Image (cartoon, rainbow, N blue to C red):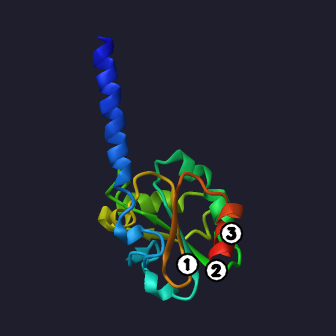
Amino acid sequence: MKALSYIFVLLAAAFLLAACSGTQNAATADGNQAPAFDLVDLAGESHDLSQYAGEGVYIKFWASWCSICLAGMDELNALAGEETDFTVLTIVSPGANAEKNTESFTHWFEGLENTENIRVLLDEGGASFEDYGIIGFPTSIFISSDGEFVKRVQGHVGNDQIKEEFESIQ
């Protein structure tokens, strides 16, 4: 029985390592151009990554069911309301990754407090999640002012750390 348990643990570890190794692809290797996107926000306005040329872009990929994501919303709202030399965007994927559909998500988000500065882009079907190699929530993406993919960080990233990162890449 111990041998079977040992084999199971080894197989699980191998599976996890294989899954994690696939997150860094050529499109999201440091120094490459960040994958393009053209997404609509909750107000129906289109956001193309190219419209932010010349400024850094911070993107937080998140989900409504993610408790860590929700715990950081007040902090993210504060950052998005500050004047910085980078743009703050968030991306959710209605109908994919166990997320609510667009209508349900929009209604749910409108009921949240302290989110007035947060710009939520809707990635219907999850193409941007795939392009950026997102495997967990929250995930932060840092894009330089010349459109280069700089860094991906999984888990919560505080505002001070976000600002320090952009100070180092600008």
Q: Earlier in the sequence, mark 1 or mark 2?
A: 1
Who's the residue at 69% across and 74% down the image?
A: 167
Label 2 – label 3 distance at C-alpha: 11 Å
Asked which quadrant contains residue 36, the reply is bottom left
Residue designated by label 3 = 163
| x, y percent for residue 17 | 37, 44
Who's the residue at 71% across and 79% down the image?
A: 83
Q: Residues within 10 Å of mark 2 (few under 14, many from 20)?
A: few
Q: Which mark is residue 144?
A: 1
| x, y percent for residue 97 | 35, 53
Q: Which mark is residue 170?
A: 2
Assign a secondary structure to mark 1. loop
Q: Residues within 10 Å of mark 3 (few under 14, many from 20)?
A: some
Asked which quadrant contains residue 38, the reply is bottom left
- As drawn, is 84 to the left or to the right of 110? right
Q: Residues within 10 Å of mark 1 (few under 14, many from 20)?
A: many
Q: Is residue 143 above or below residue 109?
A: below
Circles 1 and 3, Cβ within 8 Å, touching? The answer is: no
Quadrant assignment for the C terminus: bottom right
Q: Along the line of sight, which residue is nearer the eye, 40 or 28?
A: 28
| x, y percent for residue 125 | 29, 63
Label 1 – label 3 distance at C-alpha: 12 Å
- As drawn, is 166 to the left or to the right of 10? right
Q: Along the line of sight, which residue is nearer the eye, 117 or 170?
A: 170
Q: Earlier in the sequence, mark 1 or mark 3?
A: 1
Assign a secondary structure to mark 2. loop
Circles 1 and 2, Cβ within 8 Å, touching? The answer is: yes
Q: Is residue 78 above or below residue 138?
A: below
